Amino acid sequence: MEKMLKKTSQEYKMENIYYPLETKVLDVITETPTIKTLVLKPPVEIPFKAGQFMQLTIFGVGEAPFTPSSSPYHLETMEITILKAGHLTEAVHQLKAGDNVGLRGPFGKGFPLEKFEGKEILVVGGGVGLAPLRALLNDLFHNLNKYKRVSIKYGARNPSELSFQRQYDDWKKLLHVDFECTVDRSDGKWSGKVGLVTELLENTGIDLNNSYAVSCGPEIMLKFVTLKLLSVGFKPEQIYLSMNRKMSCGMGICGRCNIGPYYLCKDGPDMNYAKIQKYPDVFG
Ligand SMILES: Cc1cc2nc3c(=O)[nH]c(=O)nc-3n(C[C@H](O)[C@H](O)[C@H](O)COP(=O)(O)OP(=O)(O)OC[C@H]3O[C@@H](n4cnc5c(N)ncnc54)[C@H](O)[C@@H]3O)c2cc1C
């Protein structure tokens, strides 16, 4: 048993890449009516880079890809934030503390953080797309002195669908960090901005010559965010898109997640727009 606990996740993968690590659910946090965060306790620490993803197994139901939303610097637990979308995620939303799930991974490349150093980073999230970006934010916040500015723009369908609301005040207190959110539709009590997240990209004050933009959200949102970023002066090379397109194996075998010659599972899921812009199926 002791020997097993000392194995790294890499050793497990080397033994069998299809092997899901049995992992305890420590807690389930309700973020919104449709989004929950699982707090997981893997039997061994699973080192990952912000933007890399895991395959989560619900035993007897199936497996699907999800990106950790927790910090790559706090590996005792791993958080994964999940929107109820269909068969598997319905089962995820039934989970309770004490249940077991399976984890394989991490897969994918993750964000090129070394490129981001010394730059202003514009982080644009839509809906549950803020979850994969939260791992990136946790990493940026951990090394805040390496970046000139972190500007977060977030949009959700309505006020109750804004995830991680409990953290916004803490984020706003950080030096060189600003946060702004908007909702598509107000609920009457909402006193914040109403409109699409693209409207928050009009006047960011970002130093365009010294910045990168990173976005994650539904494909339709990624399309219009990309068009807006280009229209305000970002170059394709400065835009990274976290593409959470449907995929299966996570290892570049099944061929379900290609954009041109790229496999989002292996080459992404965080893709530089300059690499993929010429392919017709970029936004689904
Ligand atoms: C790399 C990666 C990272 C991801 N990270 C997260 C995350 O952190 N949090 C999160 O909530 N979700 C994430 N997703 C999406 C998640 O994998 C899907 O929502 C999940 O597979 C749906 O499974 P299901 O069985 O519940 O839905 P299904 O029953 O398979 O499908 C329900 C409906 O959702 C559609 N659908 C399923 N998967 C996707 C998808 N990937 N994109 C668009 N539509 C889809 C189906 O076409 C169908 O209409 C990620 C996807 C990828 C590829």
Image: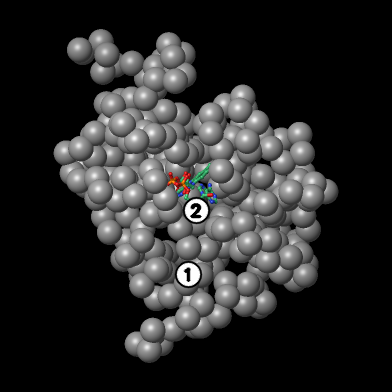
Is residue 96 or residue 150 the one in the foreground? 96
Q: Which residue is drawn at the image coordinates 41% and 34% (left, top)? A: 63
Query: Which of the two marks, 1 or 2, is nearer to us in this view?
Result: 1
Q: Which residue is drawn at the image coordinates 37% and 25% (left, top)? A: 20
Q: How is the image coloured?
A: one colour
Residue bearing the label numbered 1: 156
Question: Which tag, 1 or 2, sits closer to the chain's start?
Answer: 2
Q: Are marks 1 and 2 in contact (CB under 8 Å)?
A: no
Q: Quadrant of residue 62?
A: top left
Q: Amino acid at mark 2?
A: Leu
Measured as percent of width and height from the top left, residue 225 is found at 66, 65
Measured as percent of width and height from the top left, residue 24 is found at 23, 34
Q: Quadrant of residue 6?
A: top left
The vertical placement of 264 against 124, above or below, is above
Residue bearing the label numbered 2: 133
Measured as percent of width and height from the top left, residue 240 is found at 66, 51
Number of residues whose C-alpha sits closer than 10 Å to that of mark 1, classed few (under 14), some (14–19) or many (20 or more) = many
Helix, strand or loop for disc 1: strand
Q: Report the side of 105 relative to 215 (left or right).
A: left
Cα–Cα span, label 1 and label 2: 14 Å
Measured as percent of width and height from the top left, residue 39 is found at 28, 45
Q: Which residue is drawn at the image coordinates 71% and 35% (left, top)? A: 262
Q: Amino acid at mark 1?
A: Ala
Helix, strand or loop for disc 2: helix
The vertical placement of 219 against 224, above or below, is above
